Image (cartoon, rainbow, N blue to C red):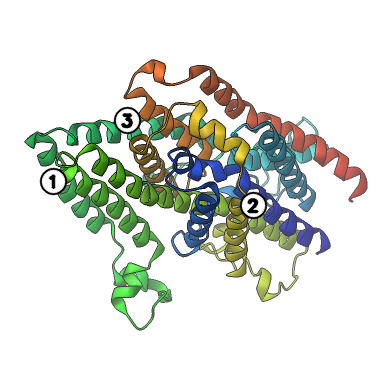
């Protein structure tokens, strides 16, 4: 039990470090454009990091918890993975490199699991409990097909989104920038497009809402038992789609009046919209990144229960993984602690990385800030809906590159960007290697 408590504490410390390491993702553009002072910006971002507690479910946490087979690892594996992730995060923060905290954690967890499999079984095959032959590399969930044609999961999908997440962010921010640029011109066609987009958004979001009957199915209790309306409105799945609609409709409303504003009025309106876009991105950052730590804690509890069959867990550690019951359940204090830790970390700031994100990639104005943060937020909501733990760092970097490309290709400082990409590529393998070394060192002292 002592080792389990140590892992939970270290996981929350990692969450705190994640907050100040990734604070720049949400605040860099609002600081660079002087919409908020640095202190105001971190307060703003931290508030919405914590607010994500009431918005997001546990889809990403589920994916992270199943990175490695919890039936074949021990607590030393998870401890080694968390320690390696903390070390890599602190190093990249010190060097001012906006690497991915998400991929650091995934790489550390997978690397320690592989080291454990090699230490226990060697490189040759072994017969598992199911009677089939297994190999050391199969301890990691590399690829798992989605149910009923849904989104597949596994480490390979997470690795694929190292490329896909920034590309999605760049593509979305490029389209939003083009949309805003055309809306600034006195032409009827951008307004027709905007109205059509508003109608399409309302139709799409309303069709994706979960009705009350579905919410209370199988005895599930809604958040507001006495009110059907508020139960539907505050269902996490529905809140996300309400937010998507709100963001798109707000930008659309601005686009309808953009051409009638003078330069000063347009700039003032864009700065106010940056508050909305940065809040939306901070919400996505909190929801995406805090869930990864929840997943690690859930995996640790599952491993502890497997190592101690028949043990009765106290209610404060009553975690159930989906493989056991079909529903991911955890005590309320775990997500509350994770969201609090990342919010506290964000309050501590990450000024070395702010400079890289806010000015070194491309020159950012309020116009670019709105487009980049809006695109980044929508990308995070989309990937969270698919239960894919993506990097908020990669997403916002791609979004900033996308708005830079609308000006000209040379507006993006590609030398800085290439350096960032190398950091992204190396994060998972270096974290995995470091975790493997830490695992072998810990195994000498912890039996």
Mark 3 lies on residue: 174
Residue positioned 48% across, 42% down in the render = 31
Compared to residue 363, the image places residue 298 above or below, namely below
Task: Give percent across and percent down for residue 349.
Answer: 60, 47
Question: Quadrant where the N terminus lies?
Answer: bottom right
Task: Give percent across and percent down for residue 129.
Answer: 70, 49
Residue positioned 19% across, 32% down in the render = 182
Mark 2 lies on residue: 15
Residue 391 seen in the current view: no
In front here: 201 or 22?
22
Disc 2 to disc 1, how far (Cα)?
41 Å
In front here: 134 or 355?
355
User: Does residue 320 appear to the left or right of 247 in the view shown?
Assistant: right
Compared to residue 152, the image places residue 338 above or below, namely below
Q: Secondary structure at mark 2?
A: helix
Precedes in sequence: disc 2 or disc 3: 2
In front here: 95 or 1?
95
Residue positioned 35% across, 41% down in the render = 370
Badge 2 density bin: few <14, some 14–19, many ≥20, Cα 10 Å: many
Which of the 4 image quadrants contains residue 208?
bottom left
């Amino acid at each position: 039990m002592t080792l389990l408590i140590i892992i939970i504490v270290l996981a929350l410390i990692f969450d705190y470090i994640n907050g100040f390491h990734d604070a720049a993702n949400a605040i860099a553009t609002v600081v660079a454009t002087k919409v908020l002072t640095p202190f105001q910006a971190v307060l703003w971002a931290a508030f919405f990091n914590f607010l994500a507690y009431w918005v997001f479910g546990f889809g990403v946490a589920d994916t992270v918890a199943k990175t490695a087979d919890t039936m074949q690892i021990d607590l030393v594996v998870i401890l080694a993975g968390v320690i390696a992730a903390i070390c890599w995060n602190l190093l990249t923060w010190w060097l001012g490199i906006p690497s991915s905290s998400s991929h650091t954690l995934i790489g550390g967890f997978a690397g320690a699991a592989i080291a454990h499999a090699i230490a226990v079984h060697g490189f040759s095959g072994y017969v598992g409990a199911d009677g089939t032959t297994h190999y050391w590399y199969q301890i990691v969930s590399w690829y798992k097909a989605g149910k009923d044609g849904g989104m597949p999961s596994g480490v390979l999908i997470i690795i694929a989104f190292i490329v896909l997440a920034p590309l999605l962010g760049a593509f979305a921010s490029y389209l939003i920038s083009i949309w805003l640029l055309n809306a600034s011109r006195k032409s009827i066609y951008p307004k027709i497009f905007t109205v059509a987009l508003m109608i399409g958004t309302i139709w799409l979001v309303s069709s994706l809402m979960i009705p009350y009957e579905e919410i209370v199915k199988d005895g599930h209790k809604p958040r507001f038992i006495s009110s059907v309306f508020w139960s539907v409105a505050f269902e996490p799945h529905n809140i996300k789609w309400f937010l998507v609609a709100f963001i798109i409709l707000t930008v659309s409303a601005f686009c309808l009046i953009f051409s009638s504003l003078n330069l000063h009025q347009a700039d003032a309106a864009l700065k106010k919209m940056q508050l909305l876009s940065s809040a939306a991105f901070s919400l996505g950052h909190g929801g995406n990144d805090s869930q990864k730590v929840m997943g690690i804690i859930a995996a640790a509890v599952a491993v502890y229960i497997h190592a101690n069959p028949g043990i009765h867990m106290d209610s404060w550690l009553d975690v159930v993984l989906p493989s056991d019951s079909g529903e991911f359940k955890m005590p309320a204090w775990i997500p509350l602690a994770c969201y609090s830790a990342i919010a506290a970390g964000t309050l501590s700031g990450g000024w070395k990385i702010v400079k890289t994100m806010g000015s070194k990639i491309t020159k950012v104005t309020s116009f670019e800030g709105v487009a980049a943060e809006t695109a980044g937020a929508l990308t995070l909501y989309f990937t969270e809906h698919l239960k894919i733990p993506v990097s908020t760092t990669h997403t916002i970097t791609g979004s900033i590159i996308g708005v830079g490309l609308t000006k000209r290709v040379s507006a993006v400082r590609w030398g800085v960007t290439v350096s960032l990409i190398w950091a992204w590529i190396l994060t998972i393998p270096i974290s995995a290697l470091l975790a493997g070394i830490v695992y072998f060192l810990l195994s000498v002292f912890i039996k």
